[in-house]
């Protein structure tokens, strides 16, 4: 494990042995998300470079918002529309054309059986 400092930002990297026997970095700190922190969100891989992240919870409660994160550019793009209700712990399935959000817990902690 090595710690590097670039521009005053501390980064920690670890190395693991890959299938071909070479040591490669396993953990490299990325730029932080531009949106506020959240936990308990649902996410899915859209394609080779993009993930969709929806719902979850922050300090103010459950969230209905979401965004797409691009690992190449390390940029977060907010979704144009929020989900109809705020969900914590929902399941997400996606491809380049469709996104499905399934279940989760609603604002009052009620277990939901909705599909969007």
Image (cartoon, grey):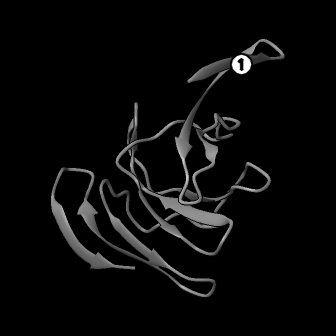
Where is residue 5? Give x, y as percent: 75, 15
* Residue sitting farthest toward the right: 7
In this rendered view, identify the residue nearer to me: 107 or 29. Answer: 29
Where is residue 116? Give x, y as percent: 40, 79
Where is residue 24? Give x, y as percent: 63, 44
Where is residue 66? Give x, y as percent: 54, 58
Q: Which quadrant of the figure contains the N terminus?
A: top right
In this rendered view, identify the residue nearer to me: 66 or 60. Answer: 66
Q: Residue at x 20, y 68 (%)?
A: 112
Q: Is residue 23 left or right of residue 74?
A: left
Q: Quadrant of residue 79?
A: bottom right
Label 1 CA crowd tier, 10 Å (few <14, some 14–19, many 20+): few
Q: Residue at x 51, y 59 (%)?
A: 53
* Residue sitting farthest toward the top: 8
Q: Is residue 32 above or below residue 9?
A: below
Please give the residue where the numbered disc 1 appears in the rendered image: 4
Could you tell me which secondary element the residue under label 1 belongs to? strand
Q: Quadrant of residue 113?
A: bottom left
Q: Is residue 106 above or below residue 57?
A: below
Q: Residue at x 77, y 56 (%)?
A: 72
Q: Is residue 84 above or below residue 56?
A: below
* Residue sitting farthest toward the front: 21
In this rendered view, identify the residue nearer to me: 97 or 87. Answer: 97
């Amino acid at each position: 494990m090595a710690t590097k400092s670039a521009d005053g930002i501390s980064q920690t990297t670890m190395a693991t042995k890959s299938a071909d026997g070479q040591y490669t970095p396993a953990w490299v700190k990325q730029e932080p998300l531009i949106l506020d922190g959240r936990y308990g969100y649902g996410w899915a891989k859209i394609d080779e470079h993009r993930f969709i992240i929806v719902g979850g919870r922050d300090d103010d409660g459950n969230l209905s918002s979401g965004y797409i994160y691009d690992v190449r550019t390390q940029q977060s793009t907010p979704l144009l529309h929020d989900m109809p209700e705020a969900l914590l712990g929902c399941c997400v399935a996606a491809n380049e054309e469709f996104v499905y959000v399934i279940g989760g817990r609603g604002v009052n902690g009620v277990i939901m059986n909705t599909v969007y």
